[in-house]
Structure formats: C-alpha cells, structure tokens
Image: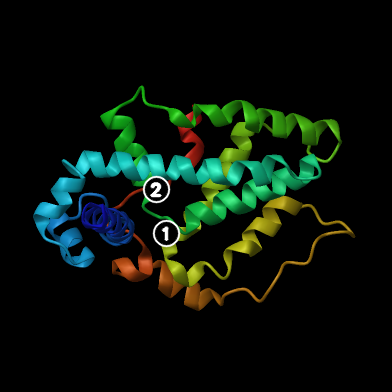
Amino acid sequence: MTSSASPRRDARRNHERLLAEARTLFTERGIDAPLDELATRAGVGPGTVYRHFANRDALIRELYDAGIGDLQGLAPGILGAETGWRSIELYLERLAEWLAASPYVPAVLRRMAELDPTYKPGAEFAEAIAVMVARAQEEGSLRTDVTAVDLSVLVDMLGSLGQYGGAYLPFWRRQLTIVLDGLRARPDNTPVPGVGQEFGEFHDMSHAKGPTQAGPATPDSPGSPLSLVE
C-alpha cells in the first residue's frame, strides 16, 4: 500500500506544480506559450506534461475549472456578510483582487468560450449576485439603477489593473475606494488609503516592454470572470 501511495502523491505534486507554473507562464507569455517551457519550469519532462494534460486545451479547461472553484470558495463570505452593502464591498474587493492577481484569467475565459461555448458552470452565480444587489437596494445602501452586470463590469475594470504586473498591486485599492464612494464630493467621503504612485513611475511602468513589467506579452484585453454567467 505504501509503495503505490507514493507514486500517487508524486503525481499529485507534479499536477499541482504544473498548474502553478502554467499560471505564471501564461501570465508572462500568454496562453499559447510553449508547453515544453512549462515542463522545464516545473522540473519535469515534456512527457509528464502530456500525461497530466492530453493537450493545451485540457490544461486551459482545468485552469478554467480551478477559477470557478476559487469563485465558489469566495461566495459564502461575500453573500453571508452582515449587510447587503457589505456584500457589495466584499464582492468588488475580493473578486477584483483575485482577478488582478491572475492576469492570465481573461485569456483562459476567451479560449474556453471558443473551445466549448455551451460550457458555463459559472451560471450558478447569476441568481446569487442578483439577490445580493436586491438586498442592498432594499436596505437603501445601493442606488436603485445599478445592476448585477454593472458590478461585474466594475470587477473587470478593477481586476484589469493586474495587467501592470505585481508592481501595481499595492495601489489598486485606491481605485476600489473611489468606485465604492463614487466621484461626488460629500462630507463623509472615505479617505483614499495610502499614498498614490507617482505619475512618472506609473507612466514608465505602463509603457514598459517585457512581460514582467507590463503583464502578458500577448495583446489580451481584460475580460470579466463573471462573463461566464452571461
């Protein structure tokens, strides 16, 4: 029993390592990066990659399903918040944070839509988001003309800041606070946290050439993790 369990543990470790390295590789070089490079980064042979994933599409599908799993894990904390407004705050914060830290996700979503347009496991989130919006509107904390789609677009906008790479992650909550408070000046505006990045530094970073500073090398435009529910 011990001898058979060890290879299974090794296989699981290799599988998780390949997924982790695929996330990094696809962030840096796009989802069409060579799978031989994935094998090198994971410290395994090319054959091991194909034993775990029959082809690139199978790998992309697993990354997609893992993303759905991430969202399912976030849902209870968001929907179970003490007020509707707190649910809105957590929804924007946690999903945008997840997307900003996972710049490969939009390309994975688009590729899955091409591979299997009928595969929409994220549809389960649609009703929950609508209930969350209705709850906040009923308590008078969310404006009545905001829809679940509006919130998904805002998540997309905030999450797209991940295109600038990890260098911007300390700053993105400034935009989150502005989104939550709105642009209208009033006495009870929430102070914007921290000190903003200097414009010159931001300009240089956003115009930098190279995947580690400017995000994916491929010209992938941002996509919402909740486009799955459409």
Locate residue 18: give its quadrant.
bottom left
Residue at 84%, 30% in the rendered image: 138
Give the residue furthest to the right.
187
Number of marks = 2
Q: Can you say whether 158 is above or below 136 in the image?
A: below
Residue position for label 1: 163
Label 1 residue SS: helix
Pinpoint residue 215: horizontal percent, then vertical percent.
Answer: 36, 62
Q: Give the mark nearer the N terminus: 2 vs 1.
A: 2
Residue at 70%, 29% in the rendered image: 131
Pinpoint residue 191: horizontal percent, then vertical percent.
Answer: 78, 67
Viewer-side label of 2, 1: 2
Relative placement, left or right, of 88 versus 223 is right
Q: Amino acid at mark 1?
A: Gln
In this view, the residue in front, 53 or 226, is: 53
In this view, the residue in front, 127 or 5, is: 5
Q: Amino acid at mark 2?
A: Val
In this view, the residue in front, 42 or 157, is: 42
Locate residue 119: give its quadrant.
top left
Pinpoint residue 167: horizontal percent, then vertical percent.
Answer: 47, 72
Give the residue furthest to the front.
1
Label 2 residue SS: helix
In this view, the residue in front, 226 or 216, is: 226
Residue position for label 2: 105
The CA span between labels 2 and 1 is 11 Å
Q: Can you say whether 149 is above or below 98 in the image?
A: above
Pinpoint residue 100: horizontal percent, then vertical percent.
Answer: 49, 57
Residue at 46%, 32% in the rendered image: 228
